């Protein structure tokens, strides 16, 4: 077992608890007798959860609110706290939405049409959703309903900007006021030591530790916290039949992959925003007929861990005995050349990410994947191997294949292996040609993404890919013409991204694309004609901004946010 990571310095008050229920009880008791602290002048309390790093914070606050608002709460408690106002804005939208949630919790239903009318006006004027501010008239009504009340506001705040609750209409939580505030800025499955974002006169930090140092006991209690947070996540999806254990596994997937590399976590690109749902499904965490529906629902409510941190290291240390069965998720970053630098992929591996950090390419041994019959997700970055006989050719259960800046060591450019179960294929600056007989058996392909790849290597395959939902063909390394991409007319995707193809002068025919919802032509700076032949009844979004391909595509069919979109012209490809 690895040595225990250094314990963080916890400021404020620490609750030493036996389990989750005891945490709720102690927090309520502390709030009840909070007037004993700091001469009774502190009325705002920021709860950080376990180890001050966020885990369990949201779930404990929700359970606290439910208990205080239930019949189980004794009269003394209700007298002490007065009205209990519970507002969950951990999935942040904007200040106006928070104000609406507060008004709804106060039963100010007559104000809802005012919100609706203002949102309708902002829709018409093109005001971005994230910029919609609170309404002064509503703030006045909220203030009048609370100013003479004794109340406890329990708030989950998910915004990134400082916010003053007084501007939303909530009376100030001053030392002589009758109101109290209990809040957290940690959402579900978020591990961090976040800075406070609510502007209050003063507040007290509250943390939580378990009463024992027994490794197994703490691991069990942490699994309980993860289960509680999973139940919260499920409540946001509206799908009550999701198993909480499955949601925990979705979180552990990114936790374990990122945590394995620690200081090298920044060197591996998982592209969580685009692919995490695909990972869950292709690895087998999400199964059965509703896997895509469940994955889409969970995608928006489970935060992804992109970089290792002390919080991740601490959680993995204490969970050690609880995650022995999760040995199939491997992530390796190497800077050593030679076949002996990489161990053979074990038989239990289901997801494997290999990134070479050296200046050249890592030549893979032919027997690297000889035992990996169960491998379903594979990414190779900066590796070289024989494309005609790839070392992973025996991995017939592959569902996700990502080749990034890989090179061929053989004479034939074509890939001779066949992966009939493949669902997602990503080729980035890797001219791994798809042979016709290989493609004909890959009938389960739902998503194809290429970047910097020759169009001619893949254009012959379209007629057999009738199940493709997303097709991104960006920054092609050769010139696209109507003639050499005519077979594109044979498929029917929901998303078609041709951005960054600077030498494309005419749009390919898409008369069969009746299911197309989004067409992206960003950076196609030489495109002279955009003629959409035939009916595209489901087309919702068309983007043609003259710049290059966007980064950080979200899993649903939505354009990435503005900050991920290029702001300068793409460099045109010279025609040979």
Image: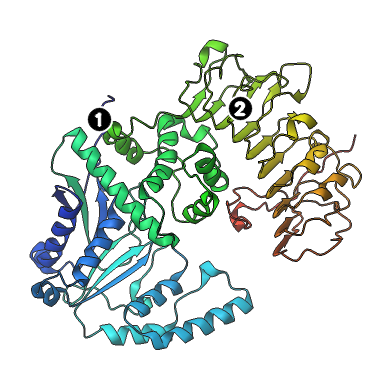
Residue 202 appears in the rendering: no
| Residue at far front of view | 289
Residue 363 appears in the rendering: yes
Above or below for 382 versus 455? above
Above or below for 176 versus 292? below
Residue at 39% over, 56% down = 233
How many residues crowd mark 1 within 10 Å: few (<14), some (14–19), many (20+)? Answer: few
Write down the residue under mark 2: 396
Residue at 86% over, 40% down = 479
Front-lying residue, 94 or 224: 224
Name the image quarter holding residue 92.
bottom left
Q: Classify residue 386 as left or right of residue 118.
A: right
Relative image position of residue 548 (x, y in whole percent): 72, 49
Relative image position of residue 201 (x, y in whole percent): 25, 68
What quarter of the picture does the C terminus occupy?
Answer: top right
Residue at 83% over, 40% down = 573
What quarter of the picture does the N terminus occupy?
Answer: top left
Q: Classify residue 73 as left or right of residue 113.
A: left
- How far apart in space, not on screen, are marks 2 and 1 (Cα)? 40 Å
């Amino acid at each position: 077992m690895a040595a225990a990571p250094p314990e963080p310095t916890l400021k404020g008050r620490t609750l030493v608890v036996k389990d989750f229920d005891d945490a709720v009880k102690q927090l309520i008791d502390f709030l009840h007798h909070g007037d004993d602290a700091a001469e009774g002048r502190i009325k705002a309390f920021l709860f950080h959860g376990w180890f001050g790093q966020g885990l369990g914070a949201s779930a404990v606050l929700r359970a606290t609110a439910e208990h205080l608002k239930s019949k189980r709460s004794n009269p003394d408690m209700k007298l002490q706290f007065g009205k209990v106002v519970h507002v969950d804005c951990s999935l942040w939208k904007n200040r106006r939405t928070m104000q609406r949630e507060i008004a709804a919790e106060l039963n100010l239903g007559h104000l809802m049409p005012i919100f609706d009318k203002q949102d309708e006006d902002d829709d018409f004027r093109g005001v971005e959703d994230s910029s919609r501010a609170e309404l002064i008239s509503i703030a006045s009504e909220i203030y009048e309903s609370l100013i003479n009340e004794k109340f406890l506001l329990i708030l989950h705040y998910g915004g990134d900007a400082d916010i003053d609750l007084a501007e939303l209409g909530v009376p100030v939580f001053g030392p002589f006021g009758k109101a109290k505030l209990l809040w957290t800025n940690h959402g579900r499955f978020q591990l961090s030591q976040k800075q406070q974002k609510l502007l209050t006169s003063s507040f007290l930090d509250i943390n939580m530790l378990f009463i024992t140092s027994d490794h197994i006991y703490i691991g069990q209690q942490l699994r309980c916290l993860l289960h509680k947070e999973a139940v919260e996540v499920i409540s946001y999806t509206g799908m009550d039949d999701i198993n909480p254990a499955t949601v925990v596994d979705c979180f552990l997937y990114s936790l374990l992959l990122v945590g394995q590399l620690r200081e090298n976590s920044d060197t591996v690109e998982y592209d969580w925003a685009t692919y995490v749902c695909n990972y869950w499904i292709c690895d087998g965490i999400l199964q059965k007929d509703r896997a895509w529906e469940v994955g889409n629902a969970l995608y928006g409510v489970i935060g992804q861990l992109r970089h290792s941190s002390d919080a991740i290291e601490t959680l993995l240390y204490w969970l050690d005995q609880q995650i022995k069965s999760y040995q199939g998720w491997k992530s390796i970053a190497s800077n050593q050349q030679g076949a002996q630098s990489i161990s053979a992929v074990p038989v239990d591996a289901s997801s494997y990410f290999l990134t070479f950090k050296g200046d050249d390419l890592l030549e893979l041994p032919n027997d690297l994947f000889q035992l990996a019959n169960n491998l379903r997700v594979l990414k190779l970055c900066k590796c070289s191997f024989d494309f005609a006989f790839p070392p992973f050719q025996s991995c017939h259960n592959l569902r996700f294949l990502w080749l990034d800046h890989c090179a061929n060591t053989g004479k034939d450019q074509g890939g001779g292996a066949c992966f009939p179960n493949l669902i997602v294929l990503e080729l980035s600056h890797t001219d791994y040609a798809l042979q016709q007989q290989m493609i004909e058996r890959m009938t389960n392909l739902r998503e194809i993404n290429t970047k910097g790849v020759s169009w001619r290597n893949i254009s012959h395959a379209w007629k057999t890919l009738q199940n493709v939902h997303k097709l991104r063909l960006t920054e092609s390394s050769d010139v696209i013409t109507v003639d050499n991409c005519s077979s594109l007319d044979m498929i029917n995707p929901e998303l078609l991204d041709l951005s960054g193809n600077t030498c494309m002068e005419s749009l390919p025919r898409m008369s069969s694309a009746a299911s197309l919802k989004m067409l992206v032509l960003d950076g196609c700076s030489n495109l002279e004609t955009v003629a959409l032949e035939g009916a595209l009844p489901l087309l919702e979004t068309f983007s043609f901004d003259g710049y290059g391909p966007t980064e950080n595509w979200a899993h649903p069919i939505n354009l990435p946010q503005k900050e991920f979109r290029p702001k300068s012209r793409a460099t045109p490809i010279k025609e040979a």
